[in-house]
Image: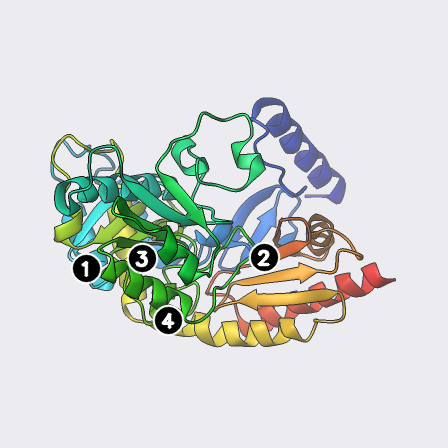
């Protein structure tokens, strides 16, 4: 395809999307048509290193052969039965996922937001049926700066005005405290508190890591007060931070894991709440469900994802490559970068606002063949697929270094 034809195809695709798709996103001006491993190709044939990995949904790269084969095999058999009947893929999937998390029960859903909503319902039911909280008085403690999704219940405890403005009235029952402050969290607990819901690393906030002793303190506090600890590992889990879960990196085991994104291998939406039967067992038939949750296609792909993670290879790879990425990024501090945060193959990079916005940096990176995403003004995030090669990571940082030099003039 010629450059002129490719440009025309891109413009036509963007025009159709702008006219007919709701404007709830502001994507970069690239039209992706295919992907392979850590790379994607646009309609003009230009390749880009994908350093977003669909917000960690593509942890194992585009078109991973094991995952694609699992999907293809299942597509030829059966894709959907609903939970009105059993299917032969769900049992093996939930058993394997429970074992991976060292728990004994799984509630399969579709999207990350559904997993969060499900976790909230489970925590409330547990509070009423097990802890003895008076009906309709259950409280859940969350953290300032959180991002757990954009459903109406979830935005009720968001601090993001873009997520909240004009979408009220909001759901009650949530108390927000400063992220990383265990003392403030404990002070907010009362007799009606049923759960603490936290991201082990706040991704949308800019890949913010709490103090090293924070999550262990939260675990101790919640146990002492008979309160559930729910870890939203939808972005941080399943290999991204150099461990199966970020909680593993700090020696913490929550009561419930909320999982999604990478659980579907970048092929199909798959999410889950994972815990033990003494908590998840509070659900009774008819109280919660999903037509597509636990469908055979999703379960087959999810089982293949769990099988990849069961070897530990991807977690170890993310840890080793992450150390290389973080070290390279830190060399840019003082040369247009104000701060770098991260764990494994996940980094938040604060750009000097005097140079430009995060969006401007991402646009310039795109011109150099690197796709990344900005957040909160001057911060960009890097989260390449775990299959990325070390040399490709180095090249991506080289491009960022060149963009910063260009902005400095």
- The disc, 1 or 4, on the residue closer to the chain's N-terminal end is 1
Q: Rounded to the nearest whole Å, what is the CA distance between mark 1 and mark 4?
A: 18 Å
Instruction: Say left or right for 335 vs 203.
Output: right
Q: Quadrant of residue 1?
A: top right
Write the residue at 43% across / 29% down: 170
Identify residue for label 3: 305
- The disc, 4 or 2, on the residue closer to the chain's N-terminal end is 4
Q: Element under label 3?
A: helix
Identify residue for label 4: 250
Q: Nearer the viewer, mark 4 or mark 2?
A: 4
Identify residue for label 2: 381
- Residue 107 spot, x, y in % from top left: 22, 45
Q: Element under label 2?
A: strand
Q: Is residue 91 above or below residue 136?
A: below
Identify residue for label 1: 103
Write the residue at 48% across / 60% down: 385
- Residue 214 spot, x, y in % from top left: 41, 66
Asked whether 66 or 236 is in front, the reply is 236
Instruction: Say left or right for 87 vs 376.
Output: left
């Amino acid at each position: 395809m010629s450059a002129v034809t490719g440009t025309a195809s891109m413009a036509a695709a963007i025009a159709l999307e702008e006219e007919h798709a709701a404007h709830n996103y502001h994507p970069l001006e690239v039209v992706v048509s295919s992907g392979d491993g850590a790379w994607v190709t646009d309609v003009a044939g230009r390749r880009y290193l994908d350093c977003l990995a669909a917000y960690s949904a593509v942890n194992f790269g585009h078109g991973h052969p094991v995952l694609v084969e699992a999907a293809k095999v299942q597509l030829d058999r059966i894709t959907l039965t609903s939970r009105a009947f059993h299917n032969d893929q769900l049992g093996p999937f939930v058993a394997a996922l429970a074992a991976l998390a060292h728990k004994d029960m799984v509630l399969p859903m579709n999207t990350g937001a559904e997993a969060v909503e499900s976790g909230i319902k489970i925590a409330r039911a547990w509070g009423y049926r097990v802890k003895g909280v008076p009906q309709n008085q259950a409280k859940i403690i969350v953290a300032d700066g959180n991002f757990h999704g954009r459903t109406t219940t979830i935005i009720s405890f968001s601090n993001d005005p873009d997520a909240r403005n004009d979408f009220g009235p909001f759901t009650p029952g949530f108390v927000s405290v400063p992220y990383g402050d265990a003392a403030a969290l404990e002070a907010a607990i009362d007799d009606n508190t049923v759960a603490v819901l936290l991201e082990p690393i706040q991704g949308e906030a800019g890949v913010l890591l709490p103090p090293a002793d924070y999550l262990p303190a939260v675990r101790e506090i919640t146990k002492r007060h008979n309160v559930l600890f729910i870890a939203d590992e939808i972005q941080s889990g399943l290999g991204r931070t150099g461990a199966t879960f970020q909680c593993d990196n700090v020696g913490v085991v929550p009561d419930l894991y909320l999982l999604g994104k990478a659980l579907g291998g970048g092929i199909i939406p798959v999410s889950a709440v994972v815990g033990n039967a003494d908590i998840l067992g509070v659900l009774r038939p008819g109280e919660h469900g999903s037509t597509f949750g636990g469908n055979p296609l999703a379960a087959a792909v999810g089982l293949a994802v769990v099988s990849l993670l069961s070897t530990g290879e991807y977690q170890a790879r993310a840890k080793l490559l992450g150390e290389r990425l973080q070290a390279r990024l830190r060399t840019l501090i003082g040369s247009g970068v104000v701060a770098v945060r991260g764990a494994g193959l996940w980094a938040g990079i604060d750009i000097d606002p005097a140079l430009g916005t995060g969006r401007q940096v991402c646009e310039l990176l795109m011109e150099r063949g690197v796709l990344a995403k900005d957040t909160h003004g001057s911060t960009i995030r890097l989260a390449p697929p775990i299959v990325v090669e070390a040399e490709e990571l180095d090249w991506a940082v080289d491009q960022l270094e060149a963009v910063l030099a260009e902005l400095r003039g």
